[in-house]
Image: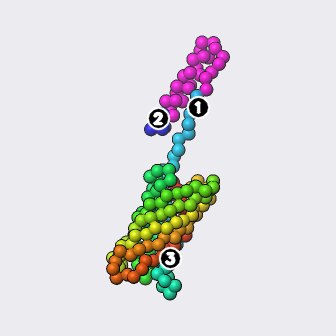
């Protein structure tokens, strides 16, 4: 839609510039055409993750997620992780960003995850930091405390992620 509007504005500007030249006038109007933003606003994330149940039980893994902006500061994220011994988890989170500097944002995160092996649901909340290296590349880290909804668990777990985001 923006390309159509910009094309019409450019044709209109060229027509206005040609009209004075044909009539002998020397002044030509100037029309500013705004550039089209070609990014989709999506961010693909690749991260290392660890789940800490207690000091004796730390599990390591990696994951992928896709973040979709909903409003200026609010995004939704869906993803999955694989841990040692082929344990899989899927998650969905909402992230709310607070810009603190040009390239630095803090955020709060809340959501849920599902451990496929144990068939356990978790609900969690936490905070993180995002540093933009460029418009397309960023680094992030967050910590999330997850409460288990299963009665067999006494307590929750802490999830720590460190990764890189690719925006497109």
Which quarter of the image is occupied by the N terminus? Answer: top left
- Residue drawn 56% across the image and 33% down it: 33
Q: Earlier in the sequence, mark 3 or mark 2?
A: 2
Q: CA distance from mark 1 to mark 2?
A: 15 Å
Does any portion of residue 62 appear in the rendered image?
no
Left or right: residue 18 versus residue 149 is right
Name the residue furthest top.
23
Question: Which of the 4 image quarters holds residue 91?
Answer: bottom left
Q: Secondary structure at mark 2?
A: helix
Q: Is most of the magenta stretch helix, strand or loop?
A: helix
Q: Which of label 3 and label 2 is nearer to you?
A: 3
Q: Secondary structure at mark 3?
A: strand
Left or right: residue 149 versus residue 27 is left
Left or right: residue 83 versus residue 117 is right
Q: Nearer the viewer, residue 137 or 52?
A: 52
Range drawn in magenta? 6-30
Q: CA distance from mark 3 to mark 2?
A: 48 Å
Q: Nearer the viewer, residue 67 or 35?
A: 67
CB within 8 Å, label 3 to label 2: no
Tell me, for residue 50, which label it has, or none.
Answer: 3
Residue 130 sits inside the magenta stretch: no
Location of residue 48 with respect to 23 vertically, above or below: below
Q: Which of label 1 and label 2 is nearer to you?
A: 1
CB within 8 Å, label 1 to label 3: no
- Residue drawn 52% across the image and 66% down it: 127
Tell me, for residue 32, which label it has, or none.
Answer: 1
Residue 18 sits inside the magenta stretch: yes
Tell me, for residue 23, which label it has, or none.
Answer: none
Question: Which of the 4 image quarters holds residue 114?
Answer: bottom left
Residue under label 2: 4
Q: Secondary structure at mark 1?
A: loop
């Amino acid at each position: 839609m923006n390309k159509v509007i910009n094309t019409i504005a450019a044709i209109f500007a060229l027509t206005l510039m040609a009209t004075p030249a044909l009539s002998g006038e020397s002044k030509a109007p100037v029309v500013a055409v705004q550039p089209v933003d070609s990014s989709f606003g999506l961010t693909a994330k690749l991260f290392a993750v660890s789940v800490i149940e207690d000091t004796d039980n730390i599990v390591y893994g990696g994951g992928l997620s896709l973040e979709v902006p909903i409003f200026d500061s609010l995004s939704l994220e869906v993803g999955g992780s694989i841990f040692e011994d082929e344990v899989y988890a899927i998650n969905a989170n909402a992230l709310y960003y607070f810009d603190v500097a040009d390239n630095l944002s803090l955020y709060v995160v809340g959501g849920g995850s599902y451990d496929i092996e144990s068939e356990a649901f978790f609900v969690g909340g936490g905070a993180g930091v995002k540093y933009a290296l460029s418009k397309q590349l960023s680094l992030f880290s967050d910590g999330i405390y997850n409460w288990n909804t299963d009665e067999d668990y006494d307590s929750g777990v802490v999830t720590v992620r460190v990764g890189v985001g690719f925006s497109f």
